[in-house]
Image (tube, rainbow, N blue to C red):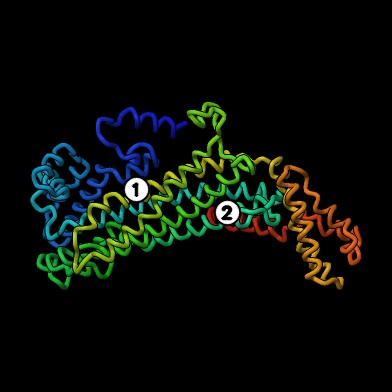
Amino acid sequence: MLRRFLFYNTCMTTNYETYQSPFTWRYGSQAMRQIWSEVYKRKLWRRLWVTLAEVQAEFGLVTADQVADLVAHMNLVDMPRSLKIEAEIHHDLMAELKVFAEQCQVGGGILHLGATSTDIEDNADVLRQRESIDLLSAELRDVLMVLVEQIDTWADLPLIAFTHLQPAEPTTLGYRMAGYGQDLFMDWLALQRTRIELLGKGFRGAVGTGASYAQLIGSENLEDFERRLFVRLDLPFFSIATQVYPRKQDYLLLGILAGLGASLHKFAFDLRLLQSTPIGELGEPFSKQQVGSSAMPFKRNPINAEKIDSLARLLAQMPRTAWDNAANSLLERTLDDSANRRTILPEAFIICDELLLTTKRILSGLQVNETAIQHNLEAYAPFAAVERVLLALGKAGADRQVMHEYLREHSMTAWAEVQAGKPNQLSELISHDPEITRYLPVDELCKLVDVSGYMGDAPQRARQMAETIRHTLTS
């Protein structure tokens, strides 16, 4: 209900007279969109300028009164004024700097002392990336906790597995879900590692040498200077930077996010297949007022799973752009990454945000059709017994190649009847074949063709995976 309220409220306050990105109002949470908002970005810029001034004050470059003035005005972002200045000078960070300086009559003159634009922009980007990972980690944890409950619930429920999109052998619903859980658990661990490993540019000036700061405080103080900044921001810095932090970090980060998208895409794609009428075993939630089709009122289209796959497909392309940014960042820096980073960084996080929120809704309201599961199991599971029978015949002394042909013929006959909508008669065909019963008695054949327990240790492994995930996320 809260999500629907926020969606409606955002729609009512959005200007529809110009192009709006769907990521502005349709996809993602308000919390994620806020992190990547223009106002919040500028507040981070101002926080970095203030932090720089605070540390410079410790080296005698800035007075306490100047710092106090900056702190007092740190959050007073004035977008109309800043955009007006930007229209004149064509530099968004300098426009914000001018507005901040105008507001600070005492301290404005010492803002940005020794800095280059990316000392502010790049560190702010990494701070936003870390906040975004924190939000995604919490959402992914919620998804996993819902999923482990589903794994435990359905660990023992047998169903027919599919390979090559063809019926194969039995597995359990919980074991299949444990596969999704294992993938997403790897993604959760990867997010935790990435959060720890993200580094800021630091404060190194125009080409990364720190020459401008050395001019101000002496080169012998540079290490201590950056250490103090790192401590205040709780943001470790790269040892080596140019005008920017290495753009390879963006590529690695987007690869992790795209990997999460791949896991969720598989889950959603499987759900779409299993929700199709010929299989009909699972279904995503479908509300009473939901419209499935404008032309066909009876439709129950899997719109949530389709949305996941659609957005994940877009996410998958973003590491390619980040690769180009890293590979083409010539010498100490070119600006040809700037415009696309305004898009790929926020949208990658917002896409992941939407994927996780949608997946949680699906899992929380997942519909399991046990009747359809049992029907499909009865129709196709007997075919899985053919291998067991063939092995037993060979062990009993029969010619494997001859028996293989008998079993193949019976299988094709039974398959044709199943395709015609009739019950699977494979067990009867095998148990009444005199060439087969010469080697195996009927009662033993009946045991072999009963595959209800032919699932190995799938239930136990499913529960073990659920417990591993639960223990890690709650410890």
- Answer with left or right where residue 299 lies relative to residue 412: left
Comparing 121 with 310, the one in front is: 310
What residue is rendered at 54% in x and 41% in y? Answer: 362
Q: Residues within 10 Å of mark 2 (few under 14, many from 20)?
A: some
CA–CA distance in space, label 2 to label 1: 30 Å
Q: Secondary structure at mark 1?
A: helix
- Please state if 259 lies on the left or on the right of 34 as rendered: right
Question: In the rendered structure, are the residues bearing label 2 and label 1 in contact, judged by CB atoms less than 8 Å apart?
Answer: no
Disc 1 marks which amino acid?
A: Glu
Q: Nearer the viewer, mark 2 or mark 1?
A: 1
Front residue of 253 and 305: 305
* Residue depicted at x 42% and y 46%: 311
Instruction: Please state the horizontal and vertical placement of residue 138, each as a whole percent of the image.
Output: 46, 49
Q: Earlier in the sequence, mark 2 or mark 1?
A: 1
Residue assigned mark 1: 347
Quadrant containing the C terminus is bottom right
- In the rendered image, residue 217, in percent from the top left (x then y), is placed at 12, 66
Quadrant of the rendered image containing residue 318: bottom left
**Which residue is depicted at the point 66% across and 46% down?**
153
In this view of the protein, which residue sits in the foreground, 48 or 22? 22
Q: Secondary structure at mark 2?
A: helix
Q: Residue at point 19% right, 69% down?
A: 331
Left or right of 400: which side holds 254? left
Q: Which residue is mark 2?
A: 470
Q: Amino acid at mark 2?
A: Arg
The residue nearer to you, when weighing 65 against 138, is 138
Give the answer, above or below, for where 288 lies relative to 32.
above
Q: Picture coordinates of residue 42 (x, y %)?
A: 22, 46
